[in-house]
Amino acid sequence: MSRFRHILHPTDFSRASGAAFKRAVDIAKADHSKLLLIHVMSPAALSYVSPQIYAGIEASARADAQKLLDALAGKARRAGVRCKTLLLDGIPHERIVRAARSTRADLVVIGTHGRSGFAKVMLGSVAGRVVASARCPVLTVREKL
C-alpha cells in the first residue's frame, strides 16, 4: 500500500469540508504524513463601496479565515498530525491545483456538497474542477446528510 507524505486539504469551512478534514487527518495520522490546510479567498462581488470600507471587509474576512484555519490546524496537531496552514487569494480550483503542484502533494482530500442538476451548473463544482486538473490523486468526500 502506498504511503502519502504530503496531503493537501482545501477547506471552505463548510460541513462537507469538515467531513473531508476528518478523512485527511485520519490518512495523515496513519501514514505519518504532513498535512497542509488551505483556504482560498475569492474576490467579493459587492456593489460599490469605498476603498476604505472594502479594505476593512477584506481584512476582517482574512482574519476570520486565518482564525478558522488555525483552529483546524490545532485539531490536527492534537490528533498527532504535523500540520501547516496557507491562506491564498484567487479562483479556488486554480489555486488549489497550483498549491498541490508547488507543495508536491501526494494527495488532495476535498469535500463535495454532492450538488447535481441545476445547482451544479449554476454554482459549478470546485471539487470536480480539482479532480479534472490535479496531477496527483484527489479523494472527494461527500458531506454526510
Image (cartoon, rainbow, N blue to C red):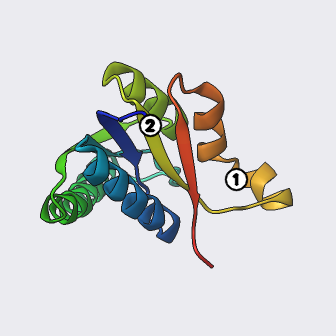
The mark found on residue 1 in the picture is 2
- The relative height of residue 66 versus residue 91 in the rendered view (above or below) is below
The mark found on residue 59 in the picture is none
Q: What is the count of numbered marks?
A: 2
Disc 2 marks a residue whose amino acid type is Met
Instruction: Determine contact: label 2, label 1, CB under 8 Å.
Output: no
The front one of 94 and 97 is 97
Residue 113 quadrant: bottom right
For the N terminus, the image quarter is: top left
Residue at image coords 46%, 47%: 109
Upstream in the sequence, badge 2 or badge 1?
2
Question: Whole-Å distance between the Cαs marked 2 and 1?
Answer: 36 Å
x and y percent of residue 42 in the render?
45, 44
Residue at image coords 62%, 36%: 131
Q: How crowded is mark 2: few (under 14 residues within 10 Å), some or many (20 or more)?
A: few
In the displayed structure, does residue 84 sit left or right of residue 117? Answer: left
Give the residue number, with chain letter if any, for mark 1.
123
x and y percent of residue 91 in the render?
50, 36
* Residue that sits furthest to the bottom in the current view: 145
Q: Residues within 10 Å of mark 1 (few under 14, many from 20)?
A: few
In the displayed structure, does residue 120 sit left or right of residue 3? Answer: right
* Residue that sits furthest to the front in the current view: 1
Disc 1 marks a residue whose amino acid type is Leu
Residue at image coords 15%, 62%: 74
What SS does tag 1 mark? helix
- The relative height of residue 130 versus residue 31 in the rendered view (above or below) is above
The front one of 67 and 84 is 84
x and y percent of residue 40 in the render?
39, 44
The front one of 117 and 142 is 142
Residue 13 visible, this angle: no
For the C terminus, the image quarter is: bottom right
